Image (cartoon, rainbow, N blue to C red):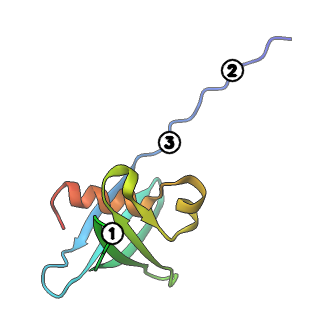
Amino acid sequence: MARTKRKKQARPPRTVSLLRSPSVDGVGAFRITDGKESAIYAFGEIRCDVGGRGFAIHRLGLGNLYHLRVGMPDECSCECLGFYRHGRCRHILGMAALIHKRLI
C-alpha cells in the first residue's frame, strides 16, 4: 500500500505587543498571542549581574512569576519549564522582540 502524505498544517504566527510602557513607574505589560491563545504579562526590569538585561514577569490570572535574562542569543535564561525543556521560551522571545523594536 502506498502511504499518503499528510500536509503539515502551518502553525499560526506568534505575536507580541506592548500594552503598557514601563517608562512611568517601572511596570509594563505585554501580550503574547499564539493562534487563538493569548496571555498578558506584567513586567519590571531587575538588576542583572552577569550581563544582558534582567526582568521579572508575572502572567496575569495564573500567578506564575518568572525571572529571565535577555542577552546575546546564547546568553538568555528563564525559570519557566519551556526553557528548561527546550532551551528557549515564549517569554524570552517576547521580551527580546520588544527590546529589538526599542519599545523597552
Q: Position of residue 69 (x, y in %)?
A: 36, 67
Per the rendering, the mark at residue 78 is none
* Residue 97 to residue 66: above or below: above
Q: Give the left or right position of residue 52, taking residue 56 as reference.
A: left
Q: Earlier in the sequence, mark 1 or mark 3?
A: 3
| Relative depth, front residue between 79 and 37 | 79
Where disc 3 sits, the SS reads loop
Q: Which residue is mark 2?
A: 5
Please identify the quarter of the rendering in which residue 17 is found: bottom left
* Residue 61 to residue 3: above or below: below
Q: Which residue is mark 3?
A: 11
| Relative depth, front residue between 63 and 38 | 63
Q: Residues within 10 Å of mark 1 (few under 14, many from 20)?
A: few
Closer mark to the observer between disc 1 and disc 2:
1
Q: Position of residue 90 (x, y in %)?
A: 44, 59
Q: Position of residue 10 (x, y in %)?
A: 50, 36
Amino acid tagged 1: Val
| Relative depth, front residue between 41 and 11 | 41
Q: Give the left or right position of residue 12, taking residue 53 as reference.
A: right
Q: Which residue in the rendered view is the most extreme toward the bottom? A: 25
Task: State the separation of the CA atoms marked 1 and 2.
Answer: 48 Å
Task: State the separation of the CA atoms marked 2 and 3.
Answer: 18 Å
Amino acid tagged 3: Arg
Amino acid tagged 2: Lys
Where disc 2 sits, the SS reads loop
Task: State the separation of the CA atoms marked 1 and 3.
Answer: 35 Å
User: Quadrant where the C terminus lies?
Assistant: bottom left
